[in-house]
Amino acid sequence: MRELTYLEAIREAMQQKMRKDSRVYLIGEDIAEYGGAFGVTVGMLEEFGKERIRNTPISEEAIIGVATGSAITGMRPIAEIMFSDFITIAMDQISNQAAKIRYMFGGRAKVPLVIRTAGGGGTGAAAQHSQSLEALVTHIPGLKVVMPSCPYDAKGLLISSINDDNPVIFIEHKLLYKNKKCIQNVPRQMYEIPLGKGDLKREGSDISIAATSYMVQKSLEAAEKLSQEKSIECEVIDIRTLRPLDIDIILDSIKKTGRLLCVEEAPIFGGFMGEVSAQVSEKGFDWLDAPVVRVAGRNCPVPYSLVLEQEMIPGASRIEKGILDLLK
Amino acid sequence: MGNDLKAKKLYITIDGYRMEDKFSGLDDSIKIEMLRKMYQIRHFENETEQFIIRGMIHGTCHLYTGEEATAVGAISAINDDDYITSTHRGHGHCISKGADLNIMMAELLGKRTGYCKGKGGSMHIADVDSGNLGANGVVGGGIGIATGAALTCKMKKNGKIVICFFGDGAANQGIFHSSINIASIWDLPIIYLCENNVYGMSTSVKEAFNIEKISDRKCAYGIEGLTIDGNNLVEVFNAVSHFSGECRAGRGPVLIESLTYRWRGHSKSDAQVYRTKEEIRQWVEKDPIERYKRILIGGEILTEKEDKDLEKEVISQIEEASKFAMESPFPEPSEVEDDVYA
Ligand SMILES: Cc1ncc(C[n+]2csc(CCOP(=O)(O)OP(=O)(O)O)c2C)c(N)n1
Ligand SMILES: [Mg+2]
């Protein structure tokens, strides 16, 4: 095994699938010579050529429409939307078309489509390039939604997403792509991580933390600190697949700890963790010693200035405070 | 138009469009003012580049260097109270529309004295009071907004018009089509000004279009349109003057394609693998500032010495702006939810 960054793991998943399956192709903006806005597809044009690394004009709606149309007729597209903020431009094609086709057609069509996109803030890119819009897509029946938090998961989950016969929104995090702190051993061979399975990233007995994407890393940071400084042992659950949701892994954990803190980057109002919280109180009320609490983004657009951005997006210290408050 | 043009001086654009040479009738002071604006943009962008290199810009910036004639020529040809919408590459439009350089620079550094109180940054600078309805982080995001501003002008019969700036890349968004069609059927007073700088990020217009001229799309909407030399301030000024008159007379909208070139990388980080140094060099030779300056000096509107002094004045103005920006305070964390209403 060798160590890969998150970005390299994602690239390797696509390369390996493309070598094996000629139906898999990439479509998106600046993905060819340029290698994608974040460098994920660097070198892929050289290996696979223009036919399969399809650079498009700036036309998000058409990217998803074209990918969907080719998916129901025998191809297996991976569409890249440069920033997750721009899925809104393609929302008709995602929500009314790709997500609904299989069901609406009485199961007589399949949509093997992966939409890869970069979400999240922390880069100073401000209100229209920093959003965490997963709640928009998790609300729509017919979409699977995946948010990997580390290189190993990114590769296995992307391979499963490509192998899936249904539309998957695969939301990557900008701060993970080249993050040296999150480099991991990643097997060379292809492997799948099943969609719909969460993962315990850290075992603990005092409190459970359920988190998504980059917030998993931030939660682990807070957990380590509290373990060393206060001997508080947090169990950190990486939700990984938001839909279908593995609620059992969370319920199993609260059976042990009796407390649940949910951590996400998106604004708290109407966020995905509201769903987790509701399901846990419906199904796990008896095991809870305290209400489920959320640490999430503030209810405002992502601001530009670093001072404000850090106030909007939760970091390890806000998570730490959330843990301590919940243990009081 | 044929007859009345005989009395007035005629101007013919690169694609053969004939119009009045309004530029030649301008006061010398206005002609010099336009050069000052071009210098302001050039040096503002040079300074911004330095801030980027020094790691003082938290987000990204898209520099307008090399495209100055388009913003200055177009915006000088409309009235102060007319509207514009700008793009992610918006510093040039903003300065041309009369923005305060100190307040702009403060926004880039994320300071509370900036145009957006540090909440917007380069991609969201707006100055609604001066008619600048905002830069935009979404490619094509301003096209609908500009069309709506033109609807206001028409409904209020206030005689104002709108210039909608957008890039070649934005011309392939769906909203380009649907907005221009609406403006056409409602005769809205708006100039759609496509800044064709050869690339949308890494994608060249050759790769993104199968037509020679983006302005040829005028046919699809039954409107006027033309392609102009966007590095020639005189041509931009004349074309926009002419069509702003048409728009005010109820004969809008129009689609103008302005040919220019971005000298710098697309944004903060861009290895520019998609173009050659030679191509860049050829366009730098068509420097819009150098060309315009030669016209003014050749026409004895300005001496070499006056030109140098003007540029020096601008440079110290920009230094002043940086100083103001650096000395300004950052916002307080408690300001994060100001202007949140729901
Ligand atoms: C809807 C949308 N898609 C993609 C992007 C990323 N992006 C920012 S600028 C840009 C290129 C824009 O090209 P063009 O419109 O020609 O303007 P230019 O940068 O050349 O001035 C791209 C792809 C974006 N900001 N918005
Ligand atoms: Mg362009």
Image (tube, coloured by chain):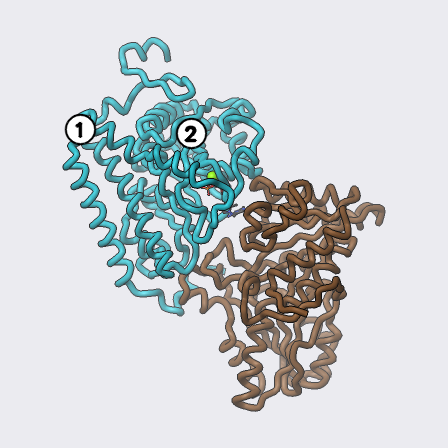
Chain colours: A brown, B cyan
Q: Is residue B75 visible?
A: no
Marks 1 & 2 on one chain:
yes
* Residue positioned 36% across, 55% down in the render: B108
- Chain where mark 2 sits: B
| Label 1: which secondary element | loop
Mark linked to residue B189: 2
SS for callout 2: loop
Residue A94 point in image, percent of width and height: 67, 49
Q: Nearer the viewer, residue A289 or A119?
A: A119
Q: Earlier in the sequence, mark 1 or mark 2?
A: 2
Task: Please state the chain letter of the residue tagged with numbered disc 1 in the rendered image.
Answer: B
B21 lies left or right of A52: left
Measured from the top left, where is residue A245 in percent x and y?
Answer: 72, 67
| Left or right: B113 as drawn, with respect to A113 | left
Judged left or right of residue A284, residue B261 is: left
- Residue designated by label 1: B301
Q: Residue at x 39, y 52 (%)?
A: B122
